[in-house]
Image: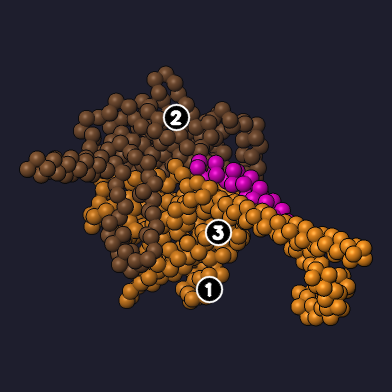
Amino acid sequence: MAALRREGRRFAAPLISPQPLNPVRSSISSAEDQAFMGVRSISTQIVRNRMKSVKNIQKITKAMKMVAASKLRAIQTKAENSRGLWQPFTALLGDTPSIDVKKNVIVTISSDKGLCGGINSTSVKISRALHKLNSGPEKENKYVILGEKAKAQLVRDSKKDIELCITELQKNPLNYTQVSVLADDILKNVEYDALRIVFNKFQSVVSFVPTAATVLSPEVVEREAEAGGKLGELDNYEIEGGETKSEVLQNLTEFQFSCVVFNAVLENACSEQGARMSAMDSSSRNAGDMLDRLTLTYNRTRQASITTELIEIISGASALTG
Amino acid sequence: MIRHASTGLLSRSIATGVQHRHFSSTEVPAADELFMMAWKRIMPNLDPPKTPLSFVRPRPSSISAADIASKLTVNLVSPYSEFSNREVDMVVVPATTGQMGILPGHMASISELKPGVLSIHDGDDVKKYFISSGFAFIHSNSVADIMATEAVPIEQVDPASVQKWLVEFTQKLSSASTDLEKAEAQIGVDVLVALNSAL
């Protein structure tokens, strides 16, 4: 019985290999056709190539993770040191996200480079929502964008609202001088009643809190302080120095804006590196998993082909002797 | 009956708990309710962003203005460093209107600062910092916030390089042609003269 089956296979073999198998294989790679001529075992070439590319990708993501980690460490201490800077302003002027003014400027802070998780889309989403929240008749909403990524997303649907776009912020290490020049640029070129700064506040390597800080224009501060309400306490303070009260208030709000932006830019850069680090960590882990699976497949196929060959040899030998 | 009594007790304890928290929250105010409500109405699917108020560190309450604290709480902040919640006897700040001493119980005020020496007195110990400019907020609860764009301990300043830069900026001032250049050189000279006299 077994001998008959073996005979049958021998007859069938020229029919099966290699011609009928070729169309299937050529769809994968025609270059490997030559390797298949007369070989009945399954090719491991494709799996091997795939393994190599996955391994390379893993190497790249690992390197990117390392880079992000070292950058994060440098920037994290900076961000933590700058956290005290805006606190006195919040203590004095309070926090007024619900203030209802005519000209709103939304300052969206994002990163220049991608591959850093969802931090940019979060700030864009929050900015869009703030835009919607503050829109109404006789109201103006403008965007000021820091960073390439938010620009790419916001240009699509609110191109006419973009007032100013600043990129390549992180070319040099961030410092206060640079940020205050930038803040000055924004204040000079944009008319505003309230500036809303949207950024991701760094909490830990895996968690970032989308945050919206509000900075009011000196006129609005003065009006609100006189009208009482949230800034009513400001009237209890005696304002010294400068010619007039409004002059000091202008200096104060401009200084506040630069301080808030400085902290926001640092926090966002910190979140970016943290997000990139965790994204790269998970992708290198994913590449590792994939590599394991591929290695398993590869080894199984190899084993199977060896077994087949052995069976062929043994059965051939036994056919001759038997 | 007893069950009812226990629930009553429980609810009361919860209520007092809430009330207590509310009382202490005068120091750390909750986020803006109005903003949260408006956000929930317009963007029900997106969590509202946090506001700086939820990250602000607790500060001493302003209720104790009547009984003057014996010490002054100073927060000196600059973009690169922070020196917070230090209790001292007196601070002298270089306000634009002249040197200003701040003692506990000082009236609430906001003052602009000019380049000069900030000295912090605690007992016999005097710490001097050179600050380039900034603002000082004095709150009615004996808390002073001093914000400076640069603050360096005076010991860390090198007198030789101050002299060198002073000469350079004086030259720049005399050779300045445009208003902007003149103003820039004037700022440099002002800072360096203040620094020089502080040393």
- Residue A57 image label: none
Could you tell whether B159 is left or right of A237 in the image? right
* Residue that appears at 56% across and 70% down: A152
Indicate the amino acid at tag 1. Val
Task: Chain letter for mark 2, please.
Answer: B
Task: Chain letter for mark 3, please.
Answer: A
Q: Residues within 10 Å of mark 2 (few under 14, many from 20)?
A: some
- Residue B119 image label: 2
* Residue A95 x/y as whole percent: 34, 53
Tag 2's secondary structure? strand
Label pair 2/3, CB-CB below 8 angstroms: no
- Residue A155 image label: 1
Looking at the rendered image, the disc whose residue lies closer to the viewer, 1 or 2, is 1
* Residue that appears at 47% across and 57% down: A199
Q: Which residues are magenta?
A: A52-81
Tag 1's secondary structure? helix
- Residue A117 image label: 3
Q: Which chain is brown?
A: B
Q: Is residue B161 above or below residue A284?
A: above
Looking at the rendered image, the disc whose residue lies closer to the viewer, 1 or 3, is 3
Whether residue A56 appears in magenta in the rendering, the answer is yes
Label pair 1/2, CB-CB below 8 angstroms: no
* Residue B169 x/y as whole percent: 62, 44
Q: Nearer the viewer, residue B99 or A222?
A: A222
Picture quarter with the N terminus of chain B = top left
* Residue B144 x/y as whole percent: 36, 36
Q: Colour of chain A?
A: orange
